[in-house]
Image (spheres, rainbow, N blue to C red):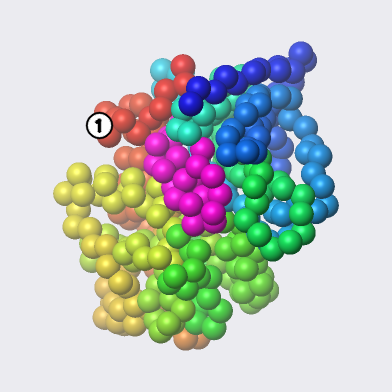
């Protein structure tokens, strides 16, 4: 199916000083929107950023049929702009949509919409180190009907906002054994809005106790580490990269996948398998060097300074020579175009 994207560009352009913008606070000047009805996508357009007109009866406002993605565009060393791993983000978007009974977006429409939007707002992609343009594709159920049903109408939209490092300090986290984020058979592997709304309460409680984030455990045993906030959980124990294997309750993180791939290529030992918090305790108590970090598009590699497990606080290794920083540097080098992009991860906008 061919989709023509009409462009309605803003006449007057005014890029703010991107460095001063808190994460996700200021949109770029344009957005993308397409409408789904009668089984097809139509009216795809890039417009000046604007508010939506939505019926209070729109299904997304009531039953949570919403899905989103998050990826980043970077200015490379040679000045060109790339969107990192657009293909994997596209695949995950559709997987989430499928889980939520929402219509697939054609690949060409997805990539072309991002290309047009980022090209138009290219001045908003920060040039300075650590800067990026965060790209948020998302879909909502827009049919106006307050009966509990799968919507027949949807809006697919993309907005962008300049982004810098999400966390500036190593994190203090706690292993959460009371509340759960997701259960197998549920929607944990989908990037749907409800997963995040449900995580607010336990995370807020943890914040009030002085933690930055929780490390979720599985719903059945509360012993298996799952993930943390909007990050996958990764560890280096004795220089071995260990991360929970993907399950139905963990998001298939693009950063996780990139770091695993890079680590293997650099000859590091990588283990994707169940990780219990007891294994972490045993490693700490045996005096092993434990690095712990969150991996995600927003936070990239977020070092964890300490983990509280069953009320005991254990310190992690965060010195400059930590393996996690090496992995981060390798990732930066590929994104910046200074290391070979052997997997075609960089989608060049131009
Ligand atoms: C729940 C959750 N886990 C993990 C991640 C990390 O995934 P990615 O590296 O694709 O950003 C995210 C962010 O998208 C997330 O929301």
In percent of width and height, residue 336 lies at 40, 29
The residue sitting at the top extreme is 11
The residue sitting at the front extreme is 38
User: Is 275 situated left or right of 349 in this image?
Assistant: left
In percent of width and height, residue 301 lies at 43, 51
Q: How many marks?
A: 1
User: Is 211 situated left or right of 313 in this image?
Assistant: right
Residue, disc 1: 342
Residue 103 painted magenta: yes
The answer to which of 19 and 7 lies nearer the viewer is 7
Is residue 232 placed above or below 333 in the rendered structure? below
Residue 173 painted magenta: no
Give the structural element (helix, strand or loop) at label 1: loop
Identify the residue at image location x=83%, y=52%.
56
User: Is 346 situated left or right of 312 in this image?
Assistant: left
Is residue 144 placed above or below 158 in the rendered structure? below
In percent of width and height, residue 284 lies at 33, 77
Q: Is residue 202 visible?
A: yes
| Magenta segment boundaries in residue numbering | 83-105
Q: Main secondary structure of the magenta part?
A: helix
Instruction: Identify the image quadrant of residue 225.
Output: bottom left
Identify the residue at image location x=55%, y=27%.
113
Identify the residue at image location x=81%, y=39%.
53
Q: Is residue 210 visible?
A: no
Check disc 1: other Cα within 10 Å, few if <14, some if 14-19, many if 20+: few
Identify the residue at image location x=26%, y=47%.
261
In percent of width and height, residue 239 lies at 23, 61
């Amino acid at each position: 199916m061919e989709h023509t994207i009409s462009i309605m560009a803003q006449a007057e352009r005014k890029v703010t000083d991107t460095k001063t913008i808190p994460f996700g606070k200021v949109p770029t000047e344009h957005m993308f929107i397409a409408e789904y009805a009668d089984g097809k996508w139509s009216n795809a357009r890039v417009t000046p950023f604007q508010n939506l007109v939505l019926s209070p009866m729109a299904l997304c406002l009531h039953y949570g049929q919403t899905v989103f993605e998050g990826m980043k565009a970077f200015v490379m060393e040679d000045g060109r702009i790339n969107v990192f791993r657009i293909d994997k983000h596209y695949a995950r978007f559709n997987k989430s949509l499928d889980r939520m009974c929402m219509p697939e977006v054609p690949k060409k429409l997805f990539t072309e919409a991002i290309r047009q939007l980022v090209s138009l707002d290219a001045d908003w992609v920060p040039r300075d180190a650590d800067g990026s343009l965060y790209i948020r594709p998302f879909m909502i159920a827009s049919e106006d009907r307050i009966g509990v049903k799968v919507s027949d109408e949807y809006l697919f939209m993309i907005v962008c906002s300049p982004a810098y490092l999400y966390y500036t300090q190593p994190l203090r986290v706690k292993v959460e054994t009371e509340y759960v984020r997701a259960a197998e058979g549920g929607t944990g592997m989908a990037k749907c809005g409800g997963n995040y709304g449900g995580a607010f309460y336990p995370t807020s409680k943890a914040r009030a106790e002085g933690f930055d984030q929780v490390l979720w455990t599985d719903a059945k045993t509360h012993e298996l580490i799952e993930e943390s906030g909007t990050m996958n959980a990764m560890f280096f124990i004795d220089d071995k990269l260990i991360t929970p294997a993907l399950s139905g309750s963990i998001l298939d993180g693009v950063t996780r996948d990139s770091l695993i791939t890079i680590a293997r290529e650099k000859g590091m030992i990588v283990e994707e398998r169940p990780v219990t918090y007891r294994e972490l305790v045993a490693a700490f108590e045996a005096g092993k060097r434990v690095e712990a970090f969150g991996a995600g598009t927003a936070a990239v590699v977020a070092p964890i300074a300490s983990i509280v497990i069953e009320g005991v606080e254990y310190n992690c290794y965060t010195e400059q020579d930590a393996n996690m920083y090496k992995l981060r540097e390798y990732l930066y080098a590929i994104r910046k175009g200074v290391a070979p992009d052997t997997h075609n991860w960089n989608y060049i906008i131009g």
